[in-house]
Image: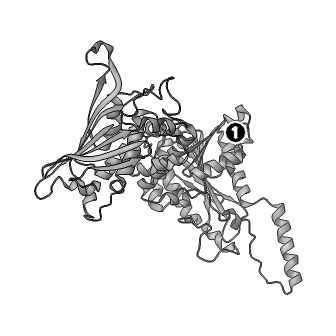
Amino acid sequence: MFMSISTTGSAESPATDLGFLLHKHPGKVQRFTTSHGEAHVFYPEAGDELCTAALLLDVDPIALVRKGRGKGRGGSPDFALAQYVNDRPYAASSLLAVALRTVFRSAMKGVCQARPDLPELVRPLRIALPAVPANGAGEGGGPAMVVRLFEPLGWRVEATAVPLDETFPEWGESRYVRIELASESVRLSDALHQLYVLLPVLDGAKHYWVAPDEVDKLLAAGEGWLADHPERALITRRYLSRRWSLTRAAMERLELARLAEADDREVEEIDNAVDDRPDETDQETASAPSDTEPATEKAEKAEKAEKTEKTEKQPSLAEQRRAAILAALRETGATKVADLGCGQGELIGALLKDARFTGILGVDVSVRALHVASRKLRLDRLPERQAARVTLAQGALTYTDARLKGFDAAVLCEVIEHLDLPRLPALEYAVFGSARPGAVVVTTPNAEYNVRWESLPAGTVRHADHRFEWSRAEFRAWAERVASAYGYGVELRPVGPEDPEVGAPTQLALFRLAESSTENTTKSSTETTTTPEGGDLR
């Protein structure tokens, strides 16, 4: 099993710098022990203008059989004599990938203590692999797969199918490919990480059991390139030996990484819908402060008991909010509803109880929230017809998504305040301009009401993740602007007990497409404002 890495240089930047990058001296032949044989590193050519490092992996077939009792070609042979006659010692596979990590560990980390600036420099690279199995297994293998995997990463690819026997061309081509990769834009550390992942992907098999920790290995080696690769689903599936539970977990984490990079945020900031803090509705179930302080401990206990009794009899604000949303949805006649930013699925559970809602989509950027929602809704235990009504999907509401189109109504329940204000226009277009449901229900806290929460310090927001909270006037201005821009009419409604001075704790906006609305107006409980028609930005 053989692979070579070549680079060119000059007297000012000699090609032998490759030795510093690989941490292997060009003047020495070095040997390393691996779990299935020995790896040899040597330099067929080492000069200022051209330097080539070669890795020769000598696989011990006896060790391969003894240590390959698990899943993979060693433990699950393709045919009865596979442990005696196979291609493992010669074809570049997961064995070579493991050898790369063993022999070039420091190079893969991009570390060079002698020349710290060297790993970040990009220099011409040419990588040759004379025999790589590229079995498509119904997924378009051969040279075409090699091109699909490497070209998007900045490589010029020469992939030639190896004939079964050059003496008998009529026998056709084998499943092996001769590969040469060339690039002037890929760093060596990135190239090694890509080979570590893509060699087993091309082969479609591994010589060891694929355990859950392989997901972490894939994401670590794919950092910076895998999340945006057009074939990331194929790569993930084949790298993890088509273990669907692992593939699903890896794809969810890759999507989070892609969204975090696009928003220039940490993954933890995006996947934060489930944590150990009390639910934000805890603040909302608190009662308004009393005008006088009780004089004795007995009076305190009596008042507390009275408040508790009232709280038990009255629905929480979260329940009142869901009831208001359901009423608005029924009013529109919607049957297909998208819950955008569904969190742990509380609204979806309420929608499921009403048979009129035949199609329900729950979308959230947080994988953890979706898992909790699935568990709380018991989707795996619901009757087949009931479960078919619900779909949970990961997605960011600041990006257009074809999955959101075709719904009668969409709900943004306590969502917009979790976005940074500069990102809000992106959500507006994704929902109102691109998805364009017949109706949109939006709820958000009324900042004026915060003074009525006993336990909420003055000037603070109701939840640590809220980026802003609007007054009634600010929410009205936003709703009218969005309705005007995208051709909707909008009606504003209070949710929860109304205070004569500061209004209700939650404010709700019901948007309807102007062409399906009886009139294109903006209403509130106290006044009506005409909303001019807006353009359709589809």
Q: Is residue 381 above or below residue 174?
A: below
Q: Point out the residue furthest to the top here.
A: 170
Residue at figure coordinates x 59%, y 73% from the top left = 460
Residue 254 rendering spot, x and y as whole percentages = 47, 48
Residue 525 rendering spot, x and y as whole percentages = 66, 58
519 sits to left or right of 116: right
Residue 234 rendering spot, x and y as whole percentages = 44, 36
Residue 487 seen anywhere in this rendered image of the structure: no
195 sits to left or right of 403: left
Res 338 quadrant in image: top right
331 sits to left or right of 35: right
Front residue of 104 and 277: 104
Front residue of 99 and 480: 99
Residue 269 rendering spot, x and y as whole percentages = 51, 60
Q: Point out the residue furthest to the front here.
A: 62
Front residue of 352 and 499: 352
User: In which quadrant is the C terminus drawn?
Assistant: top left
User: In which quadrant is the N terminus drawn?
Assistant: top left
Q: Name the residue under label 1.
A: 380
